[in-house]
Image: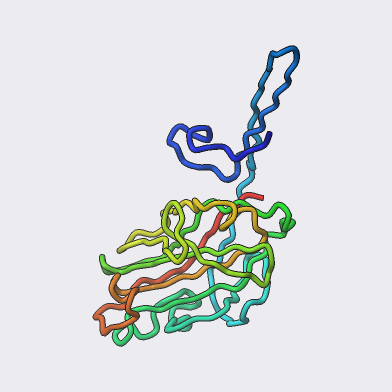
Amino acid sequence: DITEATDSETCSSGSWDPSTLKVTTSVSWGGNTLTSSEYITRWDNLTCLQTQWTLAVGDSVHTCPTTDYNTSTNIDFISSGGSLKILTPLVIGAGTLTSTVFDTTRLSSTGAAYNSIFWEGSSLEADDIVRLQIAASDSSGGPWNYYGDSPCSLGGWYTWTGIVSGTPKEINCSNSNVHNKRYFKYKIQLCTTLATCSSGGGPIGDDGPQVDNIIISWSP
């Protein structure tokens, strides 16, 4: 009997681990049953690191690293040397970018377990916002359903406020949503305030955050 390990079985803090399976073997004879349990875990941890964004290529397929992306709205790449900034923060206080398709090279029958997502960069204002979503699929053509929050929310965002960067957010989604899928994409939104994230409006009187790196960790 092979099942996903429950919260209490994977660690003392109660965090669900999509990379751990519990294998239970039972032998019965003469009305007696002997049961033994073992754990199988994905022990390796790989990272997909994107440090520059230079060319819009649509939904083409890449392995990490790459400087390509799919689409962007109100994002400035040139003045920041390939990093992400809001193009017109004084007029429209939000910018969005969608990545190209990343191939973990794992067979679609097993896929990858996605562990965490985060960004690195800088921000000068305490109310600046960076938000990220992740989508995964068995096919390089999708479908792409973006998830965020914790434990998992369709259309939600993993959100960082102010100058905080480099703090990973756990990707805590069920297998049917994200895990054990070969291909993935991410979406990022930069905002001068939380209100402009929702409205995409302005004007706002600061430059907003700058994102230099996006890092997604996963286990084969």
Image position, residue 29 (x, y; %): 75, 15
Quarter-wise, where is residue 159 in the image? bottom left
Horizontal side of residue 33 vs 170, given as left or right: right
Above or below residue 208? Residue 33 is: above
Above or below residue 218? Residue 124 is: below
Viewer-nearest residue: 119 or 102: 102
Quarter-wise, where is residue 157 in the image? bottom left
Horizontal side of residue 52 vs 207, given as left or right: right
Image position, residue 139 (x, y; %): 69, 66
Image position, residue 13 (x, y; %): 43, 36
Residue under the point 36% across and 78% down = 94
Horizontal side of residue 169 vs 179, given as left or right: left
Above or below residue 34? Residue 131 is: below
The N terminus sits in image quarter: top right
Image position, residue 78 (x, y; %): 47, 83
Viewer-nearest residue: 70 or 79: 70
Residue under the point 48% across and 78% down = 81
Residue under the point 57% across and 67% down = 185
Quarter-wise, where is residue 204 in the image? bottom left
